[in-house]
Every structure is written in C-alpha cells, then in structure tokens.
Amino acid sequence: VVPLYWGWGRDGSVWFASEMKALSDVCPRFEQFPPGHVYAGGELRRYYEPEWRETKDLPSNEPSAEALRETFEREVVKRLMSDVPFGVLLSGGLDS
C-alpha cells in the first residue's frame, strides 16, 4: 500500500502525488494525506467513519486467551473461502 502525499505550493496551490520526491521541489511543505479523507472544494473531510472508532462501546473485561483464539481462527477460516481452489502471485494493486 502506497500512501498519498499532498503539499502546498508557494502560490497557495495544493498538489497531490504518490511519492514525496515529486513534491519536494515544488512544495515547501508537504505531508502524508490522511486515510479515510477526501479533499473537495478546498475542504478536507472524513468520508469513512468506522464503528470501531467510537471507544465508548469497548468491553470492560479482559477476554480469555481461548476466546481470542477461537475468534481469530473463525475469522481466518471465513476469509479463506474463495471462488478458486488456490491462487499464486495474485495482486490487488491499482496497477493490476
């Protein structure tokens, strides 16, 4: 996963690039674009609000090691299901 970078030009322009070096010559200030955000109309706003961001609903008791293991194994098996029996060198990148 390659982060997106954004920078601000001396003239007030906003630049975006997938590599920091593309911004280093034209922008005196640049940083990594925050994940889960969109920049539109000169405004940065969060478009993705996952439920787990709210910490008020966290359990107060410690889960047992056995419960953690069972949950982990169940979720791994769930994600192992596929339309094909196996895959080698599969890519999910934007360049694929």
Image: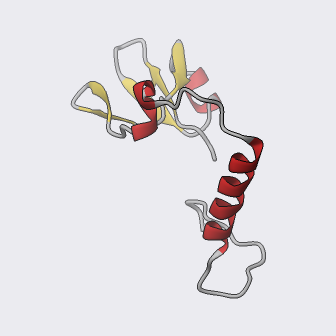
Q: Please, is residue 93 above or below residue 6 in the view?
A: below
Q: Residue at x 66, y 38 (%)?
A: 63
Q: Nearer the viewer, residue 40 or 55?
A: 55
Nearer to me, 64 or 38: 64
Residue 48's place in the image compared with 62, above or below, is below
Work out which quarter of the rendered image holds the C terminus and state it: bottom right
| Residue 55 higher or lower than 28, as above or below | below
Q: How is the image coloured?
A: secondary structure
Instruction: Report the number of discs.
Output: 0
Residue 44 x/y as whole percent: 32, 26
Q: Position of residue 82 (x, y in %)?
A: 61, 80
- Report the side of 12 relative to 4 (left or right): left
Q: Residue at x 52, y 31 (%)?
A: 59
**Residue located 53% across and 12% down the image:** 28
Residue 48 locus on image (x, y percent)? 36, 40
Locate residue 71, reporting x and y percent.
65, 54
Q: Quadrant location of residue 81?
A: bottom right
Residue under the image location 64 percent in, 29 percent down: 21
Q: Left or right: 10 with respect to 31? A: left
